Image (cartoon, helix red, strand yellow):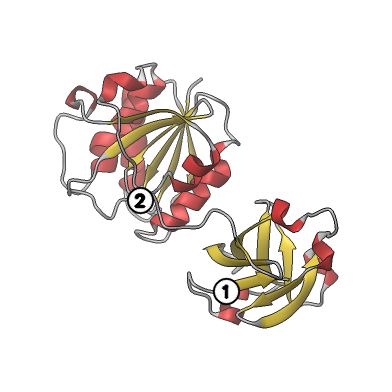
Amino acid sequence: MPIITLLTDYGLRDHYVGELKGVILTIAPKTQVVDITHDIESFNVRQAAFVLHQVWSRFPPGSVHLVVVDPGVGSDRRIILGQYAGRFVVAPDNGLVTWVHREYEAEAMFVAEDRRYFLPQISSTFHGRDIMAPVAAHLANGVQPRAFGRVADRLEMLPIPYRAEATDRGWLGSVIYVDRFGTMVTNIREEQLHTPRDEPRSWEVLVNGTSIGPIRSAFCEVAAGTALALVGSSGVLEIAVNQGSAAERFAPTENVRVEVR
C-alpha cells in the first residue's frame, strides 16, 4: 500500500487538510495517508525543513512526503519533486528540502509543471490542494518522477549551518528548532562531541555565555526547574529545563549562541 505523509502549517481548525486528503484519495484511493503534523508555525519554512528531515528515514522506501509550508504561493516560485534514499518529496522550492538534501544524495529532482497531473481548476492561494496533492497522488500511483516536468537545475537552500562551527576550545552552535516543550534543538551533532580524548560529559555547555554545566544523559539528572544540556533523540545537543521550558528561560532567537568547551 503506497504511503503519503502530510506536513503543513494549515492547522486543524479549517477544512484545508481535509481537502488535501480528499484530493489524494480520489486519485489514489488505495493510498495510506499519514499526518506528520499540521502545527508548523505559519510560514515557518525553517521549522518544517527540520521536521521533514527528522521523519524522512522513519518511513519505508517508496513513501511520498507532501510538505506544504508555502509563503510564496501564487508567485513564480517552483514546485519540486525530489527523490532521496528511495523516498519522495513534493514541496514548494523554498528551502523545505534543505536538511534532507544535506544528509542524502539526490537521486532525482524535477519541477512539477505538467498540468495533466494537476486539478483542472487551480486557485492562486491553494496550490497544496490543486497542484501538490494531485502530484503526490499520481506519484503514489506509480507515475515516474520524470513525467511531471523538466529536471530541476537548482534548489533553494536555507542559510542554516548543518554542523556547529569549530573553535579553539570546542564548538559554537545555534538553535535550529524549538519543540512544544520549549526544548531548544541545536546544530551541535553528537559525533562532534566524541573525540579520542573526550566524551560528552567532559564538555561544559554555555547558552549566550551562561554555563549550564556538563552534558547530561537524562532530564532526571537535575532537579525540576533546572536547565540542562543533553543529546536528544535527534542525535544533536539540546537545551532543556527539567519539567519546564528552555525557550521561556533563555528567550531564544535563531541567533542564540550555544557553546561547548
Residue located farthest toward the bottom when viewing the structure as drawn: 210
74 or 129: which is nearer to us? 74
Q: Are marks 1 and 2 in contact (CB under 8 Å)?
A: no
228 to 18, vertically: above or below: below
- 77 displayed left or right of 49: left
Q: In the image shown, does 238 or 170 lie closer to the viewer?
A: 170
Q: Residue furthest front?
A: 168
User: Which residue is disc 2 drawn over?
Assistant: 69
Q: How many marks?
A: 2
Mark 2 Cα-neighbour bin, 10 Å: few <14, some 14–19, many ≥20: many
Kindly identify the amino acid type of the residue bearing the numbered disc 2.
Answer: Val
- Can residue 217 be seen at all in this image of the molecule? no
Q: Inspect this view and state whether residue 69 appears.
A: yes
Residue 199, disc: none
The residue that disc 1 covers is 257
Amino acid type assigned to the residue bearing label 1 in the image: Arg
- As drawn, is 139 to the left or to the right of 181? left
Q: CA distance from mark 1 to mark 2?
A: 27 Å
